[in-house]
Amino acid sequence: MRVKRLLSIIAVLLALLTSCQKSDFEYDETPQGNLDALWELIDQRYCFLTYKEKELGISWQEMHAKYSAKLNAKMSRVQLFEVLCQMVGELKDGHVNISTSLDLGRNWSWKEDYPENLDTELRNQYLGTDYHIGSGLKYTILPDNIAYVVYESFSDGIGDGNLSDMIAHLRLCNGMILDIRGNGGGELTNAEKLSQRFTNEKVLVGFTSHKTGKGHDDFSEPRAEYIEPSKSIRWQKPVVLLVNRSCYSAANTFVRNMKEMPLVTVMGDQTGGGSGLPFTSELPIGWSVRFSASPSFDARMHQIEFGIEPDVKASLDESLAADGKDSMIEEARKRLSGQ
Amino acid sequence: MRYFVPILLCLLTVVCSLLSQQAHAEQTTYEAVPDRSPSARTFLIGIGRTNQLDTYLSPMEYKGMQISFLTQSERMTHLAKRHISFQSTFQGVFTSADNPAETATYTGARLAYDAGWHYHHSPLKGLDLKGGALIGTDLGFLYNDRNGNNPAQAHFSLDLSLSAGAAYQFKLWKLPMRASYQADLPMLGMMFCPEFGESYYEISQKGVGHDILCAHPGNALSFRQMLMMDFCLPRITLRVGYLCDIRQMNAHSLKYRDTSHSFMFGIVRHFSELRIKR
């Protein structure tokens, strides 16, 4: 009897302990379930809600009702995709995307609403055909002994050897034009590695924090970010950093870093912004959602989500472009030549 | 998921090979397994279902399969008039699970080791009850194949568990058999958990110090239980059973839960103090 009782207790324990696990899966796959999941994801995890509500004059709380009204149970996936994209589009954040097999949901107003200030064919004429390629870097020496370096994407890796060889090759030039127009970002480590070549001492370049909870203002204490000088060869002459509205994400962070370097002048248009480190999540329907999760700030704790103002405003002059000249590069050359 | 069948076949081959070696190596005939085997080593492999929730990676619960192996050794010590045994368990798990829409996959692996002592008591002939404590560590990861800056989550814990079990030996159709059950419940320890929106990029820059937390049933209610049946054949003891492993964490507004139910099978080797027929 005692054995039977013991076995019965074990069986009951077994059943209890394996069945008490309740799923947290609270969303259904209906259009409303997906909208709820997306709204809650942004509400709890998006790092710029308070800032965006203030700057853009929106209320995320009201978005739920506004876009729920556009749903119906029989709507197609395409229609649902459009409604969800419209809702997150209100945030005007290039790091907020809904990725599906249908399309990539995006809001690229940070660059599409402004002049591009870049003609790649024109830029290629300055590079010529005998330029050097050091992994993601393209560089040459212009006739007036100015180094011209193009870095198109921070996704293109750069090694310490590439940077050392490039600086050694350009060391006799009078200055450097570093052209990152059109650079939409990539790896932050590449931005940091390149910045380290332009300072001889440790420089405070900004701050970063992350969300610590679901509340809109639950953030960790801002942590200072420094750029340490590279232990290899470093650039010691004036630099003009050419930027445009397409400089986004890691490129925006790079501009933030370079603004703190004493020999660097940032020239061009305001950058595109994108100062939130994006995370990825998903919706019940299986679509992937990217969103800004950790904000970064400049050295004065200012938001750089909507971009960084250049030190010198410059834009592409279409009339000069017709003559095969890039007015922004020409302006940078003049500045570096001391004219 | 498509790799499970070949991997399982490989594991089956390994087990068959081990069984074959065992059969050749053991030239003795066992009458039965003693109530408390002085020393026993178990090697099991398993296949089962797993449900995984990790809100750092996704709010969705992923479901899939897992394969695992478990080796366990248990020996009676001379402590408390041979009432105390030492047990060590090493477990490895490989999982693959899909989200409900089957558009993303988690791939995970986990290694766990624990060791400790049990006090044994036999209130009836053939029945062995035991209770004790284990110290264990658990190290693993979960990787989501489409996440960007939060592609994976690391798991680490070090804890002290309470452990209890029972074993009952009986004969069925003249075949000696042994049913055993053991449950382990972590009570106190430490675990790693990133903060809610903290990236591993940031963790790599400032270290993990503030991400190590005290673990207790209030924030990490985990549980492992095994129900096993031994078939004591003339030259070998086969073991089949059920393993339920529940790992949970609820900290920094993040939830992690890995619930698995596996069918386990393998062999048990008993050493010394066996009655040998010459």
Image: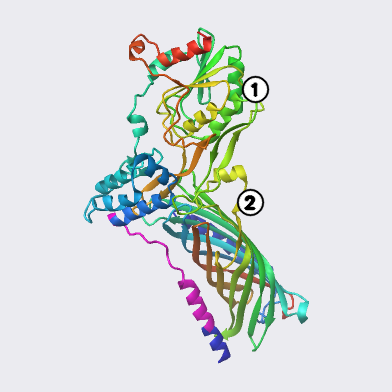
Quadrant position of residue B179: bottom right
* Label 1 CA crowd tier, 10 Å (few <14, some 14–19, many 20+): some
Q: Is residue A167 above or below residue A23?
A: above
Q: Does residue A155 appear in the picture of this structure?
A: no
Read off the magenta span: A9-31
Q: Is residue B183 left or right of residue A15?
A: right
Q: Is residue B65 left or right of residue B19?
A: left
Q: Does the stretch in magenta take in A15?
A: yes
x and y percent of residue B185 in the render?
Answer: 59, 70
Q: Nearer the viewer, residue B39 or A200?
A: A200
Q: SS at mark 2?
A: helix
Q: Amino acid at mark 2?
A: Gly
Q: Is residue B177 above or below residue B197?
A: below
| Residue at x-position 47% and y-position 37% | A303
Disc ID at residue A233: 1
- Disc 2 to disc 1, C-alpha distance: 34 Å
Q: Nearer the viewer, residue A171 or B210?
A: B210
Q: Is residue A8 above or below residue A178?
A: below
Please name the residue that numbered disc 2 is placed on. B209
